[in-house]
Amino acid sequence: MVRFDEIIYKKLTDAGVEIAKDVSARTLSTFGSGGFVDYVVYPKNAEEVLTCVSAFEFKHVLGGGSNVLISDNGLNAVLSMKKLKGYAFDGDILRASAGEYLPLLSKAAYERELSGLEFACGIPATVGGAVKMNAGAFGKEMAGVLKSVTLLKNGEIVSTTPTELKMRYRDGRIGSAIVIEAELKLTSREKEKIEYEMRENDAARRRSQPKEPSLGSVFKRTGATAPAVYIQGCGLKGVRIGGAAVSGVHSNFIINMGGATSRDYLRLVDKIKNEVRARYAVELEEEFVFLRD
Ligand SMILES: Cc1cc2nc3c(=O)[nH]c(=O)nc-3n(C[C@H](O)[C@H](O)[C@H](O)COP(=O)(O)OP(=O)(O)OC[C@H]3O[C@@H](n4cnc5c(N)ncnc54)[C@H](O)[C@@H]3O)c2cc1C
């Protein structure tokens, strides 16, 4: 593997790109585990993204880190899209850069009496991560609100649509492309109705999700039965390995009880998969993404 080194560091910083060195992965993933990342590269616009990817072939792209588990061995380099900011409304179209925070956009749409992002008000995602994962909640998903997506694919900036991508449940089907920005198609709606739905969604989340650090749902819901039902059926609620535990509030969440390693998380994932397979002959599929070199 070609490694990101001081020569590439100098080349990119000379070009004005912000790069942080020796960053603890605990600050990059919402689960709060993982080793150190040698270089975290923060492009601020599409041109800088192009400069970065022409200087180095990044294996790892990061948004808000709310769905990534980072190896305890650390990583050499990460392209963080978090600082690619900016959004604008044009009538009922919202155009947003990859690093914009989805709950913030949901609020901004509400302020303009525009509907479509009520489902997203509590998803701790950036636009890029939400497109990549086709994030969703309460029966809605990104594919339903996306008009178009601008991607960096094979060194070129291209525009595509959710239909062309054939986005699926928790899979935006963008492969190794990098999301630069997205256009969302919203619709007019009374502010009170938007507010009511957002409040209901928030309340449902508070009731059903743990407060401790996590990566959200560990496993995808692929069949009629939710993974939490199988996990609970195996008596795994509250089961702990090292600092990682199956949440007592929601069995499809693994929480960090303090000092959890990514290995603890993965060992717990294996235990759950093995027990669910043995008891129900069901193969659970991970929703989180594991980053390792
Ligand atoms: C408390 C909690 C609640 C959650 N609730 C939900 C929920 O209701 N619904 C839901 O769907 N998810 C939920 N999640 C999971 C998570 O928020 C989503 O998967 C989200 O889409 C991840 O976005 P991110 O920006 O944090 O991406 P990251 O976690 O940083 O990355 C996720 C994946 O996207 C890729 N990626 C990130 N940015 C880009 C980009 N610009 N271009 C290309 N690839 C990129 C990464 O390489 C990685 O493969 C929850 C997580 C937590 C912690």
Image: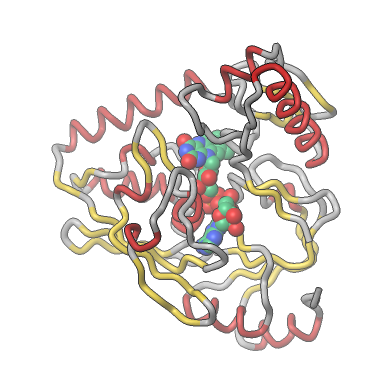
Residue 170 in the image: state x and y as whole percent. 48, 45
| Residue 268 seen by the camera | yes
The residue at the point 40 percent across, 61 percent down is: 165
The residue at the point 18 percent across, 32 percent down is: 192
Residue 208 in the image: state x and y as whole percent. 50, 20
Residue 13 in the image: state x and y as whole percent. 67, 82
Task: Answer above or below: position of 98 versus 219.
Answer: below
Q: Is 121 placed left or right of 240 in the picture?
A: left
Query: Within the image, what quadrant is residue 283 found in?
Result: top right
Image quarter where the N terminus lies is: bottom right
The residue at the point 61 percent across, 63 percent down is: 61
Q: Residue furthest front?
A: 281
Task: Answer above or below: position of 135 versus 227.
Answer: below
Nearest the eye: 143 or 197? 143
| Residue 64 seen by the camera | no
Residue 78 in the image: state x and y as whole percent. 68, 65
Image quarter where the C terminus lies is: bottom right
